[in-house]
Amino acid sequence: MQPDRVNILGVAVSAITMREATTMLEDWIRERTPSYACITGVHGVMESQRDPALRAIHNAAGMVTPDGVPLVWMSRLLGFANVERVYGPDLMREMSAISAVRGYRNYYFGGGPGTAEHLRDTLCRTYPGLQVVGTCCPPFRQPTAEEDEAMVRDINAARPDIVWVGLSTPKQERWMASHVGRLAAPVLVGVGAAFDFLSGTKRQAPRWMQRNGLEWAFRLAMEPRRLMGRYMRNNPTFVLRALRQLMQPGSYPHWRGDAESRVPQLGRTV
């Protein structure tokens, strides 16, 4: 059963909890129907304002989890009181623990050179019995058609149940949308920086900062040159547009849901 979705600036965000998210991923594995999940925060929502194709990719996803606390707050203001943050690193931890028990096969696609292998070693130590059946560090540039086909063959040969994609937004969303169905794996999940955080390559913000919507400030302090432009461009604009949506219902009517087929609404969808 698909969870309700909430329209946040035209992006269909799943009104979901962590337990519901893991249950949905397990359902996809059992059903063997290829689907992808976007783990989306303010950055993904704001990129979708500038790129209608990216917005359509989000809205066609099987699940779009509220990765950032601002999306959780916005969901609750729009009438979804039970929504929880479903943060990429935490979802990956939860599914790794479940996979170790259930025998699900995991594949890591993305990260810098050596990151996926380090992630594999770290998580296999943390979750004894976890099966990681392959890793791939794709080229930073656009791969050729031949390179892409070779990567698809390698992933399919490994027979994973879950392909974790760590390419950052919006690259990972575009990759998942263009490869769902080409890959035999029933689950693709775009988790961005989770590869770096869980492998220990980058530091995570303290939990109190995460809970209070201040993770962006910690990350900015860690990587000011890379993230300054993103946060200064996205965060104030998100706040202004979110206020507009709350004060002017119908100001973002272009949400259309799965495969762009649902009727646009401000809040709850059916």
Image (spheres, helix red, strand yellow):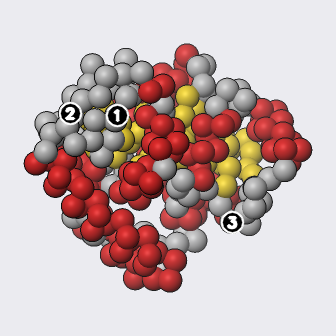
Q: Quadrant of the C terminus?
A: top left
| Secondary structure found at label 2 | loop
User: 180 or 206: nearer the eye?
Assistant: 180
Chain-order first, disc 1 or disc 2: 1
- Residue 106 in the image, given as x and y percentages of width and height: 64, 40
Residue located beneath label 2 in the image = 267
Judging depth in this view, the residue of 78 and 51 nearest the camera is 51
Residue 13 lies, in percent from the top left, at: 34, 39
Q: Is residue 95 visible?
A: no
Which residue does the numbered mark 3 point to in the structure image? 112
Residue 255's label in the rendered image is 1
Query: Rounded to the nearest whole Å, what is the CA distance between mark 1 and mark 2?
Result: 10 Å
238 with respect to 184 (left or right): left
User: Disc 3 vs disc 1: which is toward the camera?
Assistant: 1
Tell me the residue at 44%/27% (across/down): 260
Identify the amino acid type marked 3.
Answer: Gly
Which residue is painted at 30% across and 46% down in the image?
9
Q: Quadrant of residue 141?
A: bottom right
Q: Earlier in the sequence, mark 2 or mark 3?
A: 3
